[in-house]
Image (cartoon, rainbow, N blue to C red):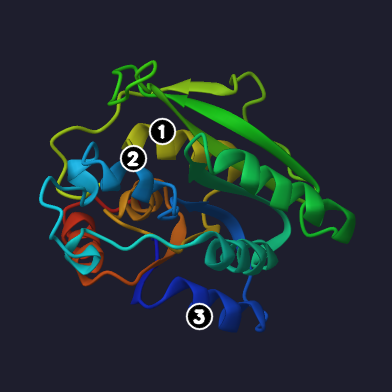
């Protein structure tokens, strides 16, 4: 039976403290609130992410705050320290954050913290908003520490899953997409980490496929959504 731990905490502080312990995870799947989201919020094109047409609305009133590049760099380096000896991590990112993350990953390769990195493309099937060629893709940075073989070597690096619409939490990722990552990089009974759990989709995938998970978010609304979601998931035995 899956063991799911849900924690309300600041990711930057929690990751730094936990990286100093012996705790390590078999896989990390997470979707950080990149600073690049603020570009779209400021012009009101990303209303469901807290963007708005009222310029007087405060940043604190948005669904969730974003994290700046220095904060995210610190989070990235503590995050990869929590990867177990032979493990994978999957970090969602947009087209602006993606090359920056890859640079951080490749800078870490000589230290052994990351041995391999690759951007996967998530094809959302439905186009989103945009002024110059409407966006239909997002990126998932795959990181490897040590050497771990994927279960299915025939899967392509373009993953097509329709984006979630009418969701109750912004930036929610499709369950089937998360399941594809989880099933290809982990085995039953292994332990995953999502330090920006949002809607709790990683937790649901773990419950359905007999994996353990530690889910973290600073936002009380994310914690509420995650607990509510997981309470309605059939538990794998």
Q: Is residue 111 left or right of residue 211?
A: right
Q: Tell me, yes or no, whether the two marked residues, 1 and 2, touch with CB atoms within 8 Å.
A: yes
Instruction: Estimate how packed mark 2 is, as few (under 14), some (14 to 19) or many (20 or more) residues with alpha carbons within 10 Å.
Output: many
Mark 3 / mark 2, whichever is N-terminal = 3
Residue at numbered disc 2: 173
Q: Tell me, yes or no, whether the two marked residues, 3 and 2, touch with CB atoms within 8 Å.
A: no
Mark 1 / mark 3, whichever is N-terminal = 3
Using the rendered image of the protein, determine whether residue 140 is visible from the camera's viewpoint. yes
Residue at numbered disc 1: 177
- Residue beneath the point at 62% across and 33% down: 119
Pick whichever, 97 or 23, lies toward us. 97
Task: Give the SS element for disc 3.
Answer: helix
Residue at numbered disc 3: 13
- Residue beneath the point at 21% across and 48% down: 51
Pick whichever, 168 or 51, lies toward us. 51
Is 84 located above or below residue 176 in the figure? below
Q: Is residue 120 left or right of residue 236?
A: right
Task: Give the SS element for disc 1.
Answer: helix
Q: Position of residue 214 (x, y in %)?
A: 44, 67
């Amino acid at each position: 039976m899956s063991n799911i731990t849900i924690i309300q905490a600041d990711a930057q502080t929690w990751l730094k403290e936990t990286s100093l312990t012996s705790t390590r995870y078999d896989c990390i799947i997470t979707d950080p609130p990149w600073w690049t989201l603020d570009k779209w919020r400021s012009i009101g094109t990303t209303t469901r992410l807290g963007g708005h047409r009222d310029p007087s609305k405060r940043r604190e009133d948005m669904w969730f705050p974003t994290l700046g590049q220095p904060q995210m760099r610190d989070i990235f380096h503590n995050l990869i320290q929590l990867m177990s000896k032979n493990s994978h991590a999957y970090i969602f990112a947009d087209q602006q954050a993606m090359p920056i993350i890859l640079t951080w990953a490749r800078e870490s390769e000589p230290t052994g913290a990351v041995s391999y990195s690759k951007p996967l493309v998530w094809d959302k099937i439905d186009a989103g908003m945009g002024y110059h060629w409407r966006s239909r893709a997002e990126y998932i940075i795959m990181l490897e520490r040590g050497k771990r073989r994927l279960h299915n070597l025939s899967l392509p690096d373009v993953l097509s899953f329709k984006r979630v619409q009418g969701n109750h939490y912004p930036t929610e990722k499709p369950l089937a997409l998360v399941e594809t990552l989880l099933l290809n990089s982990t085995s039953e009974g292994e332990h995953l980490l999502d330090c920006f759990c949002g809607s709790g989709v990683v937790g649901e995938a773990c419950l359905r496929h007999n994996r353990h998970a530690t889910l973290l978010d600073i936002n009380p609304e994310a914690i509420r959504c995650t607990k509510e979601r997981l309470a309605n998931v059939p538990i794998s035995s």
